[in-house]
Image (spheres, rainbow, N blue to C red):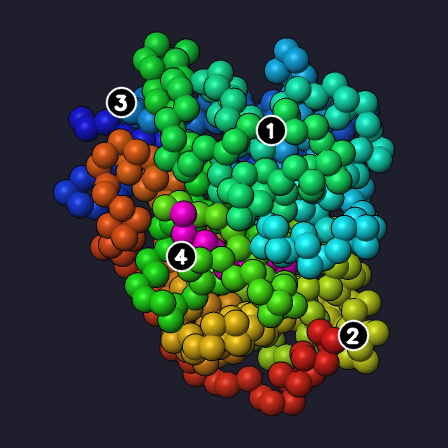
Amino acid sequence: MTSGSVAVDIGASSGRVILGHLVDGRLALTETHRFETPLVRDPATGLQSWDLVRIEAEIRAGISAAERLGPVESVGIDTWGVDYVLLDAAENPVGPAVSYRDHRTDGVMERMVERLSAGDIYRRTGIQFMPFNTIYQLAATAETHPEWLARAHRFAMIPDYLHFRLCGVLANEYTNATTTQIFNVSTDNWDSELLAAAGVRRPLMSRPVEAGTTLGEFVSAASGRAIKVIAPATHDTGSAVAATPLMSADEAFISSGTWSLMGFESRVPFLDEQARALNFSNEGGAERRFRVLKNIMGLWLIQRVRAELGSPSHADLVASAASSRPFAAIIDPADQRFLNPDSMIEAIRAACIETEQEPPADAATLARCVFDSLALSYRRVKEEIEALRGQSLRRVRIVGGGCHNELLDQLCADACGVPVTAGPVETTALGNLAVQLMALGRIASLDEARAIVLESFPPRQFLPREAVPDEIWHRFCSLAKK
Ligand code: ADP
Ligand code: LRH
């Protein structure tokens, strides 16, 4: 049997280990393991954190399961962005791996921006201002737990750390480094002034390596074999867009999961005043292509609503929303109150009451409110992208777990007024694999990888049907200004 590569793709809702084979110009995937990635309260500090011990054990279990299916040549890990661990002199974690959803960063961004100037931070990094960016998380640590930074010898983003656990080589990978808002897009390295402002000593950081770098070897306890550890685009969105079959410059992507990341690909970053005013990110990608995008609150809203409703199936929630009255109540998903409220249902209802709308009262109306509001957000970002580029978009490609939601796929086509394609669901794993296969010399370029993805997993099409009524669009625009 031909050897395969393993993509470990860990999202904020679930992690999966996927074995990929490239056979006759097609990629075939076998999921060998899936697990939840819930937030846990660190017992010592109460901080909302990730359980990296468990995540590492799940990764090892998934790789062993893949090996039972046949020889594995390489493995690479991607995760959500912005989160990190500090390592001490013995390379053990200092403090917990705190989640970006923890409230410790409340108010930190505002204070730092006042001190440093938003224009200057944006010119250096080109990254969207979000309160949970790594720079503000580090500044929060410097305020509340300076002893952690004092003890730290190294800084690792989550996938950097997990790769280190597999192969013993610690490297900071480029695509995820760009999500920190501490990476200087002009010098192509960590920004010393921003590091100092965040309270971090420069020697903690190493010059980021490219996506596609072979880091070392993982010697499998199960088989005794050595498996190459290859850093993919370790930022999950970087891997997702690497495999999104973008076929021309007038196509946008939405990487749809816990977040909806909507944007376009560019060979150059957009760093001017308009990009800053619109608060776009220029995230670094494989082959040094930039993802010019906006973080939209995404399916996190429905994940939390669903959990509070006792976890009805996704299919039931979507079906009930489909039969519920359109636009009965809408919210602005960008409102930071939705980042991590005690109750998402109460946060949505409160936002509706404040804007004099009937608050959704049951699963169907809550889900409809979330899906309608996300579709309106997609239209807003589509218009912002068009303004930024001075060019119309002609297609939106949705990838990720969220494209299972055919109601949302259709609402996106209706709101944006352009054809939408949905799929593949496992685009992030495909992008992770593609970069490994490029490093192994099996695929020549991202363009070739995308052609293979399109051939292997043809997406579904959704054409625009009903335009959003003007009154609704104006209501949404006025919500966003409040
Ligand atoms: P992440 O990588 O951030 O963990 P995923 O890409 O796995 O996220 O997407 C998870 C989301 O996909 C869920 O929150 C859910 O809203 C949506 N989803 C998954 N399966 C379905 C389904 N069968 N129907 C509708 N939505 C679904
Ligand atoms: C999506 C994602 C996104 C980040 C967020 C923290 O999973 O990586 O690109 O901004 O998580």
The magenta segment is 288-298
Q: Residue at x 77, y 22 (%)?
A: 150
Q: Secondary structure at mark 2?
A: loop
Label 3's element? Answer: loop
Q: In this picture, is 26 found above or below 48?
A: below
Q: Position of residue 366 (x, y in %)?
A: 68, 67
Count of numbered tags: 4
Q: Main secondary structure of the magenta part?
A: strand
The residue drawn where x is 40% and y is 47% is: 288
Choose the circle earlier in sequence order: 3 or 4.
3
Q: Can residue 2 be seen from the camera position used here?
A: yes
Q: Nearer the viewer, residue 293 or 311?
A: 293
Sequence-wise, which precedes: disc 4 or disc 1?
Answer: 1
Disc 4 + disc 1, Cβ < 8 Å: no
Rendered view: 2 above or below 126: above
366 falls in the magenta region: no
Question: Can residue 314 be seen by looking at this rendering?
Answer: no
Q: How many angstroms separate mark 4 from mark 2 (CA)?
A: 35 Å
* 2 vs 3, front mark: 2
Could you say which disc has been placed on residue 267 in the image?
A: 4
Q: Residues within 10 Å of mark 2 (few under 14, many from 20)?
A: few
Return the x and y of residue 386 as percentages of the image width and height. 49, 75
Q: Which residue is labeled 2 in the image?
A: 482
From the image, tell me which residue sits under label 3. Answer: 71
Which circle, 1 or 3, is nearer the viewer? 1
Numbered badge on residue 23: none
Q: SS class of the residue under badge 1?
A: loop
| Residue drawn 33% across the image and 58% down it | 245
Q: Secondary structure at mark 4?
A: loop
The mark nearer the N terminus, 2 or 3, is 3
The amino acid beneath tag 3 is Pro
User: Can you identify the residue that label 1 sits on?
Assistant: 205
